[in-house]
Image (cartoon, rainbow, N blue to C red):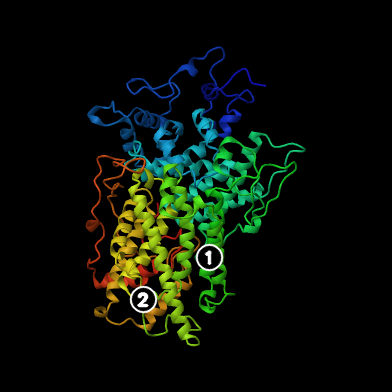
Amino acid sequence: MRNPVACVSCRSAKQKCLHNDAPPCDRCKASGRAHLCEFPPPGTSAIHRRPKRPRLDSASTPPSATPGHTGAHQAAAAFHNGRSDAPNGISPANAAASSTMQSPNSTSSVLDGLDPFDLLTDEVKNSYLRCSYKWSFHHTPTLLLRIRDRSLEAWMAWAILALAIRFVKEPPPPFKTQTEASNAFAAHARQILQSDLETPSISRVQALLMLTGHDWGAGNGRRAWIYLGMAIRLVEVMDLCQELKPPHNRHPTRQEFIEAEVRRRTAWTCFLMDSLLSGGKGRKRSLDASDMQIQLPCERESFVFGEVVCTERLDGSLRMPSPSQPIGELGIIAYSMRAANIWGKVARWACSEVVTSELPWVPSSEFQQLTYNLETWKKSLPQRLQYDLFSLHSHNAVDQGQAYCYMHSIYFMSYMFMHRAYLPVLGPHHGTDEAPRSYNEHPEMWKDWQKRSRGELFRESTMVLEMLEEMRTFGVYFLRGLVPWIGFTIYTAVGVMLYSLNFRSDDDDPAIADKAKERVMQGCVFLKEMQTQWPMAATWFETIKRMQAYYRTLQPEGGPVSPDERQALRRAMIDYGALQPSPVHKPVDSKPDPTINPPTVQPTMVSPANSHQNGYGNSFFPSASPLEIDETFDLNFDISDADMEAMMMNATQDFWASFPGEVGVGYPPS
């Protein structure tokens, strides 16, 4: 039964206000706004009728405004109205920031008391929904309704802002950049979550996963791995990897199906991120395929419209409830889960001693088994999900282009990681110091295998960079929806293509070799632009530059490379992540790398001159001018001898030994 007195927040949202005759009410407590819950005096609604934000031209302080909250309310008003009423052109938000940003608790000073829904503009919401292929657990109509009614949990609202604000055209005041705002919003979401993490809930798991994605892209792999572990524990406590007991002798209602699908998709997103971030030293998967006793996510339309369907499980089995339900189709999200499961196996294989101990061409080898898994996955795709450039354009036309690229990037990454294990790190050589253990026993077979493996690696890398060429024609509207995994896939392909450029062979495909330099340059332009949204890309870009400088020293005029140097880099390929900071181990040497200088001025992501918002016209930001390739990446830059020694231990190893989620030495934490 509804109480006769409702708090101001519940009145504004027209929601039931349940309480024990004193604040906070149940709704404010659940949304993390208990300290803001306020009841109007009996018999009056004057407080309820006052403006939600103080008027900027008001000379008096609103009755309920506290000194610590005034600047935050003004910041929200300035961002919402897009104007400045302060003298000398200084907005109230910036004035507040100048006083609050000096203290260690500046973020909380600015954001405490600020309603995140004031920042969830149409631009922010649209930016977030473009990434819905990664955060597929949201039932979009319900999410939008809860944002409209301001009933979404506070930690969810701040987590959405942390992910989406990086894609907007202008940062909200008082923040100078989108990245600064993103980090502040993520920190605020963490602060709210940590106050009550022992209370399991679906939304807490979802927020932890979103913050994991934020930290990974921000270059803080260790914290991302920790928060992912917390989400996995909550998933296990809530038993989300098991199906709910179906209703007796009837089909689930539309709402029951949606709620069950949200549970499944939350667990599957956890499985996806656990699989993708696994690998490297000390990063094993916590969720195995056998743990996922739930059906795969259904096709998007069935989820949105609440159409009750039954789908296959990860292993292809179908467990029909009673009474039987229609069999639903699998979409991009479901096939991405199956690809991620294979990647988890590839990552474990690449970290093991099996790489150097087995004969990869033998049918019983683990390499051949993984290759069979990848080919089986590829053949299982429906015709419209098979990879080709026509399908890429088609999916982009129906707003599924990013999801399509994401799914295939998992496949491309798996294939490249498998074949790059057999590429000599320092280029072609005549010795055996980098060779597998059985090289002397089967020298001719190994040479033939390495030749074929090299060709496969270069072909897959070429396909990734051709995909990048097409993505760039779709414009910034498309590129701003890409998640870091796609960036890491492109980074991997660029590094492989850089290798082919420096160490050519008569056996290489001329069509690939002739365009290698152009594709390396285009890939570096993309990585440099991507760092404006995902700071981790700055490390990738710098690593590629240093690799090129290092490879130049390995040419004939650079002198021979010693067996010790070859062996050191070979160990880096086997012991992935050991010589750089990993999410679970402190680096052995914490000295800064003199070869990395994170850029202080971030470039603006721009589109080719002939692209536009929906993919085929003018730039998304008309004022932006395209970056020139030559000023972005110079293949002939010089570097000192002192820096070269540092690169010996870092540049090439950072590329050949890195897994997704690992951060290069010297990059500052976000």
Q: Is residue 244 left or right of residue 575?
A: right
Residue 422: x and y in percent read 45, 74
Between discs 2 and 1, the one toward the N terminus: 1
Q: Quadrant of residue 365?
A: bottom right
Q: Position of residue 134 (x, y in %)?
A: 49, 47
Observer able to see residue 278:
yes
Q: Which residue is mark 1?
A: 346
In the rendered structure, which amino acid carries the disc numbered 2?
Asp
Dot 1: few (<14), some (14–19), or many (≥20) neighbours within 10 Å? many
- The crowd level at tag 2 (other Cα within 10 Å; few <14, some 14-19, many 20+) is few
Of residues 299 and 531, the one drawn nearer to the viewer in this rendering: 299
* Residue 589 visible, this orientation: no
- Residue furthest to the top: 43
Labels 2 & 1 near each other (Cβ < 8 A): no
The residue located at (42%, 41%) in the rendering is 164
Give the alpha-carbon distance from disc 2 to disc 1, as whole Å.
27 Å
Q: Nearer the viewer, residue 620 or 196?
A: 620
Q: Nearer the viewer, mark 2 or mark 1?
A: 2
- Image quarter of residue 338: bottom right
Q: Position of residue 603 (x, y in %)?
A: 28, 49
Q: Residue 342 in the image: state x and y as whole percent.
A: 55, 61
The amino acid type found where label 1 is placed reads Val
* Element marked by disc 2: loop
Frontmost residue, 196 versus 213: 213
Figure quadrant of the N terminus: top right
Task: Check residue 507 in the rendering and tell me which mark sits there, or answer none.
Answer: 2
